[in-house]
Image (spheres, rainbow, N blue to C red):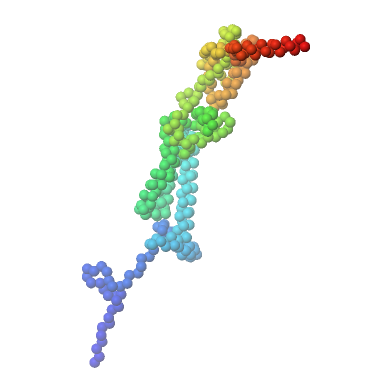
């Protein structure tokens, strides 16, 4: 009679005691998870459609880097790049379509239309960002580690950018600066020139002067600095031209000719009417000032002054009106040394004449 000993179970098969959640069996190391949750769904979909495509997908997925519990493969990179390009293309197309619809809105003026375009673009790109995050299957809580550093980057590195963006929106909302306005621009040498606002961008406005020089002025500068807007409430601009004539001239005739010179210039408005004023008595001339209005300051100020002065010059020549030049009276105080010098010069001349 033989006795058999019951087999001893392997350690891996030893059941855990009741109430104990672990056993003595060696646990397998956790498998690294893909960086993108969308990769698993993409792999399953492609594998069910074609075995050839599935092998290609497996090959791309085999090339991977592992960081802790996160695995990033070549397939993850291709999927992420494709999704990003798709989202950017769709967002750009929708932005262009929204801009074309706003251009057709006849109830909106240019400023309101531009403001609507910028606000709609901000919302479209913000929605595209979150949709792209959702398509990639990225958990936003994973970005919590970088939120502090990202906040500091916005606070310091992008402070001016966001400041200019908000300043541009505010300028469009209160309509203090809008495309088409004529403002004064001062260059680095301190010379003032007039320029027309071509567009208001996210960071700066574009101002084009008469000599085709384009200035890019940050939006924030227009918020904190004094700006001369020549067409803020009206496009009519008054121009002043100083003139001086001789004291011997007929002042009534001079005033009449000054008004005629202004009225004969094409760009000068008839309403309000040009005016000529006597503003003072100078050292060598009677000072007048011609004041007239134009409604196209973007065409320049110096050229219209030149046209008025050239017409005035022709009228003055026709009526013998003299434009004086500065005159000075020289008085020499006498002294003993000066009298002796004069006598010596006279004596010398006399001696030469006798010889």
- In the rendered image, residue 26, in percent from the top left (x then y), is placed at 32, 72
Please say whether residue 108 is visible from this viewpoint: no
Please say whether residue 24 is visible from this viewpoint: yes
- In the rendered image, residue 319, in percent from the top left (x then y), is placed at 64, 10
Residue projecting furthest to the left: 18
- In the rendered image, residue 78, in percent from the top left (x then y), is placed at 48, 57
**In the drawing, does residue 258 fall left or right of residue 4?**
right
**In the drawing, does residue 306 fall left or right of residue 83?**
right
User: Residue drawn at (57%, 29%), measured in percent from left and top?
Assistant: 210
In the picture shown, does residue 24 fall above or below 203? below
User: Which image quadrant: the N terminus?
Assistant: bottom left
Closer-to-camera residue (210/46): 210
- Counting every numbered tag in the picture gives 0
In the picture shown, does residue 64 fall above or below 185? below
- In the rendered image, residue 314, in percent from the top left (x then y), is placed at 64, 15
User: Residue drawn at (35%, 69%), measured in percent from left and top?
Assistant: 28
Closer-to-camera residue (106/91): 91
User: Residue drawn at (48%, 51%), measured in percent from left and top?
Assistant: 85
Q: In which image quadrant can residue 333 be found?
A: top right
In the picture shown, does residue 133 fall above or below 72? above
User: Which image quadrant: the C terminus?
Assistant: top right
């Amino acid at each position: 009679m033989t006795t058999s000993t019951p087999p001893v179970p392997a350690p891996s098969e030893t059941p855990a005691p009741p109430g104990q959640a672990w056993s003595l069996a060696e646990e397998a190391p956790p498998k690294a998870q893909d960086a993108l949750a969308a990769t698993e769904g993409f792999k399953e979909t492609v594998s069910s459609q074609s075995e050839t495509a599935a092998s290609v997908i497996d090959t791309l997925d085999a090339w991977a880097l592992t960081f802790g519990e996160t695995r990033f493969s070549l397939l993850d990179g291709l999927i992420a790049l494709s999704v990003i390009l798709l989202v950017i293309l769709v967002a750009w197309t929708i932005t262009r379509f929204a801009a074309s619809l706003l251009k057709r809105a006849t109830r909106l003026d240019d400023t309101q239309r531009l403001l609507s375009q910028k606000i709609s673009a901000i919302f479209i790109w913000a929605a595209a960002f979150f949709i792209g995050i959702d398509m990639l299957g990225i958990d936003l809580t994973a970005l919590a580690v970088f939120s502090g550093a990202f906040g500091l980057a916005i606070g310091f590195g992008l402070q001016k950018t966001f400041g200019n963006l908000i300043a541009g929106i505010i300028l469009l909302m209160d309509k203090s600066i809008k495309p088409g306005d004529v403002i004064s621009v001062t260059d680095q040498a301190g010379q003032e020139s007039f320029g027309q606002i071509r567009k208001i961008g996210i960071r700066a406005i574009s101002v084009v002067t008469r000599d085709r020089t384009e200035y890019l002025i940050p939006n924030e500068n227009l918020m904190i600095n004094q700006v001369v807007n020549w067409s803020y409430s009206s496009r009519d601009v008054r121009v002043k031209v100083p003139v001086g004539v001789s004291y011997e001239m007929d002042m009534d005739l001079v005033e009449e000719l000054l008004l005629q010179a202004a009225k004969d210039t094409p760009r000068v408005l008839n309403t309000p009417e040009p005016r000529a004023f006597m503003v003072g008595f100078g050292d060598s001339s009677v000072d007048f000032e011609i004041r007239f209005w134009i409604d196209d300051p973007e065409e320049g100020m110096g050229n219209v002054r030149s046209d008025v002065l050239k017409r005035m010059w022709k009228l003055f020549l026709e009526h013998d009106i003299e434009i004086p030049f500065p005159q000075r009276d020289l008085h020499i105080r006498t002294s003993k040394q000066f009298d002796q010098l004069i006598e010596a010069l006279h004596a010398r001349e006399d001696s030469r004449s006798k010889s």
